[in-house]
Image (tube, rainbow, N blue to C red):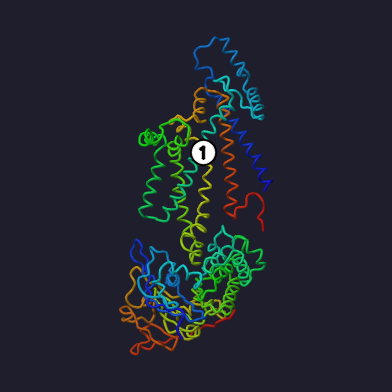
Amino acid sequence: MSRYIGKRLVLMLVTLWVISTLTFVLMHSIPGDPFSSEKKLPKQTLENLKAKYHLDEPLPVQYVLYMKNLVMFDLGVSIKSETRTVNEYISDGFPVSAELGAYSMILALVLGIGMGVLAAFRQNKLADYNVMVLAVLGLSVPSFVIAPFFQKWFGGDWLPLMGWGDFKHAILPAVALSFLPLALVTRLMRSSMLEVMGQDYIRTARSKGLPPWRVITRHTLRNAIMPVVTIIGPLAVGILTGSFVIEHIFSIPGIGKYFVDSVLNRDYSLIMGITIFYSALLILVNFLVDLAYGLIDPRIKVGGKEAN
Amino acid sequence: MKPLLEINNLHVSFNTYNGEVQAVRGVNLHLNKGEALAIVGESGSGKSVTAQSLVRLIPSPPGLIKQGEVLFDGRDLTQVSEKEMFKIRGSEIGMIFQDPMTSLNPTMTVGKQIMEGLMWHQGYGKAQALQKAVDMLRLVGIPNPEKRVHQYPHQYSGGMRQRAMIAIALACNPKILIADEPTTALDVTIQAQILELMKELQEKMETAIILITHDLGVVAEMAQRVAVMYGGKVVETGTVEDIFYRPRHPYTWGLIQSMPRLDQKREEDLIPIPGSPPDLLDPPKGCPFADRCPHAMQICHEEMPEWTNVSDVHRVTCWLEHPDAPPVEREEPRVNIVSR
């Protein structure tokens, strides 16, 4: 097991290196540079600025310099702000984004699994239809359309329209952000429950005389939850990218806003920093999901030989 | 002697898009204490539906017990509340199914799956249930049960899983064991072992067995009494000897004839029953076998024959038994029941 984890960690680092290299190349192939949008600077100033950030060096040299710093977890200074480091941006913005993302994820999983189970149990009945209508809505209406409606309906008197502070501020954006993942989880859980409910071993469980709730909690759920665990990785990606938009709409000082701005400004170090940070996060989530498989389904032995 | 279980005029239907499929159409059967009754018939004859209806395990909807009664222990199982059914299933009537590969929960240890019934029905504590689970595994012939009890189904072979299924079904010492094609999915040597085990346990625990099968070899091995089903009805019932050596119904006759025999010459063809079973969406009003029967008469297509008692236990529904029916010449049944 520890060998497997070690192997995976090495692979994760390789993945991260590939991502950062690709981002570096792509970023520098965009025309312009961090200073091109500013008002005309004197030639000498521009050259001094470029020299300060090593932008006058050939690209391979810049790459090596960047990688050297990256290994020491130094993501550099934001070119635009000049004083704040990328690490500061992340440590400022990420807790906010993480809180919002965590709320959405929990909401999507708990509510999605609950509604999926309910729909499966009331298959082709009113509750099922209602849940499915909600799920199709969630799939087809993007969050940036939902969010303003939420602001109009619930914002103002009941809940704060925008901003960040206490828990109340998180409710509307979290719900808006969880809309798509919630729909995905619900649909997946419903179909997976229906499939498991038709399995022979569920009939065996019923033939033992167990009442329905016991059959569900002890036999159906654990087998039906696998597909949902599988999509937690992609779900995290969805919530992450979704949060860029949602944070903008609700004026939340999370990392998403910085990221969008950094791309517009070609703030090289900030683009690199946030991309690498988020990539690392997602790679980690996927790794944890893989470990969770082994806990849920004994037939999947992560890494080692089968324990006999 | 009062039978342990009595099925009277059982009708079970499935509502499908095409209409109502009458899978079971008026089945009468009884099961005595400690005996093994085999229900034989081809696919779609209603044998599995009959068995699963006894404990109301048919999926409903679309399945529905339309009428009839199942008398067990002074109660009509078609009428008792679902709550009461929870107490009967697993505790008084155990079941084992066809495919041991899919009938066990893959994410739960075998031990826990045995313990579950014990803890639910008998109020066993965890330690006590675990002990009993180990005992049950030993009883069904699983080697090293102390270790095996903590393993998952995928660590068992097919035969061992069916043994584990039997352990689950018998854990609460039920009065009846319903075995729905218990050996169909197993290879022949394992089949023989499982049958041997079931026979042994039947005697040891005095459990009555309802054996659903289409394998006449299994019937000869296990059962004392046989009911032959066709088109949702029981067409003939009797002892194993009655059915194998003195079959009266043309369908039973055909079944026995179509069995391969050990002394058969290689170039001799097997004798199939021509035709196909009736459409239960629109069942015939006469005898369901009439369309395929070599001796069918006008009346066979129009009216269902009454029961005729050939002997105390040997009964048949066929117009050929009627005093006015023309005599039919039949070959001597060419069976040899080879005991395995």
| x and y, in percent, of residue A204 in the image | 51, 65
Which quadrant is home to the C terminus of chain A? bottom right
What residue appears at the point 37 percent right and 52 percent down from the top-left corner? A127
Front-lying residue, B208 or B199:
B208
Image coords of residue B149 (percent x, y): 63, 64
- In the image, B64: left or right of A298? left
Q: Secondary structure at mark 1?
A: helix
Q: Residue furthest right?
A: A3
**Total residue callouts:** 1
Height in image: A170 above or below B236? above
| Relative to B102, B2 lies left or right | left
Say if residue B43 shows up in the picture. no
Q: Percent x, y for residue A299?
A: 59, 55
Please tell me whether residue B322 is drawn above or below residue A298 in the rendered image: below
Q: Residue at x 54, y 9 (%)?
A: A42
Residue A227: % across, % down:
51, 49
Quadrant of residue B74 within the rendered picture: bottom left
| Residue linked to disc 1 | A237
What amino acid does circle 1 point to?
Val
- Mark 1 crowdedness (10 Å alpha carbons): few <14, some 14-19, many ≥20: some
Q: Is residue B242 above or below residue B232?
A: below
Could you tell me which chain the residue with mark 1 belongs to? A
The one nearer the camera, A69 or A117, is: A117
